Every structure is written in structure tokens, then in C-alpha cells.
Image (cartoon, rainbow, N blue to C red):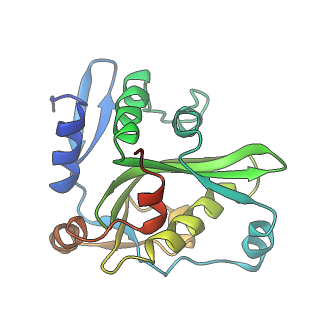
Amino acid sequence: MGGDLEPGTLLDAYRAGYFPMPLGRRQLGWFSPDPRAILPTGGVHVSRTLARHLRRFEFTIDTCFERVVEACGDPGRPHGWITPAVVQAYSRLQRSGWAHSIEVWQEGELVGGLYGVSIGSFFAGESMFHRATDASKAAMVHLDRIMQSSDGSLIDVQWQTPHLASMGVVEISRREYLQRLRTACRGTVPAALMDSRPV
């Protein structure tokens, strides 16, 4: 409990295997689940229906980061935890090249996406949203394709859910997770994420 959402605090936490979630209005919690849920690189499941939907979507990276985070934090969603302070904190990370968003578009409208923190070949997925069928799944597929370009990459999704399991997410022990995290943080940033960093 405690701490802050300053860029240095957040990056140190992710490198150590923790991620933050506000608890109520004034408290900040730091979590390191055991087991930990990850999406094995190249292991995303694409159903026939999802494959058809993918052809209808267009994808961008970091073109409207704050819109994605705010959409993930829609107060109408159950168990919402993305506060204005969280939006501000991760937007600071994005401006310095440490956080990224995947945007999913259909006919010029933002219909889904995800955001997270990137360190080396490690990507910590924070949250995702959809306004069209399979749009959040499509964002995961696109992220998986991006991360496949770096050896030893690790995609963290924090906790397992039935929805994530259907996409190919698996659980590993915290010990294994921390071992893989150390390696991934020393890895090479995927080219697509590097290209989107501010100059």
C-alpha cells in the first residue's frame, strides 16, 4: 500500500513484477499475483469468427493514447479503477515512450483498443475495451504480432479470466514470471513500438 504514480515509481514497480491499482479514492495498492497470467507470444487463439472480424478492422499505435485509456476507464464498466490520476500518470509514461496504446478502427471510428507499459521486450497489458464485436480481441492479436518481432518477449495480462483463457492466456508461477520478466526487460523493444516513440 502507498507510494505514488510518478514515472520512476511505476517503471521500478513493473521491473520488480508489481502493478498498481487504486483502492478507493485515496489508497494505492501494488499487486504481484501468484500465479500470474501471460499471453504466450505467438500463442493467441484466433477463431474463425475473429479471423473474419480482423479483416474489417484497421490498427494504429499511439495515435490517441488518452482516448484509449479513458475508454478503458468508462465509469459505466463494472469494477472500474482507472481514475483521472491513472490517466494522467500513464499519459506521462506514453509521452516519454514507456507506454503504448493499440487502437482498433472500423469505418473511421475508434471501436476498441488496449494500453500498457513497454520495457525492452516486455509488455504489461493494463486494460482494454471494445465498442464493436471482437475489437478488444483484435487489439490483442495485433499486440501479439508486434511482440513476435522480439526474442524472449513477455506479454503480461495480470490475472486469468475465462475471456482471456479463450484467447490463449495461461498462468505461470510468480517465480517463473519474475525470471522471464528479468530477461524480457533486457530485451529489444519491438520495432513497431520503437517507431511510435517520440523523437
Residue closer to the observer: 89 or 172: 89
Could you tell whether 155 is left or right of 59 in the image?
left
Evaluate whether residue 158 shows in this view: no
Residue 14, given in percent of the width and then of the height, sits at 23, 51
Q: Residue at x 84, y 49 (%)?
A: 107
Q: Residue at x 50, y 69 (%)?
A: 146
Residue closer to the observer: 162 or 46: 46
Could you tell whether 64 is left or right of 173 in the image?
right
Q: Is residue 190 above or below residue 5?
A: below
Q: Residue at x 36, y 33 (%)?
A: 92
Residue 30, located in which quarter of the rendered image?
Answer: top left
Residue closer to the observer: 67 or 187: 187
Residue 190, located in which quarter of the rendered image?
Answer: bottom left
- Residue extending furthest toward the top: 26
Could you tell whether 103 is left or right of 16 in the image?
right
Evaluate whether residue 20 shows in this view: yes
Residue 90, given in percent of the width and then of the height, sits at 38, 36
Residue 189, given in percent of the width and then of the height, sits at 34, 65
Q: Is residue 10 above or below residue 58?
A: above
Residue 109, given in percent of the width and then of the height, sits at 78, 43
- Residue extending furthest toward the front: 199
Residue 1, located in which quarter of the rendered image?
Answer: top left
Could you tell whether 50 is left or right of 182 in the image?
right
Q: Quadrant of the C terminus?
A: top left
Q: Is residue 83 above or below residue 37?
A: above
Q: How many marks?
A: 0
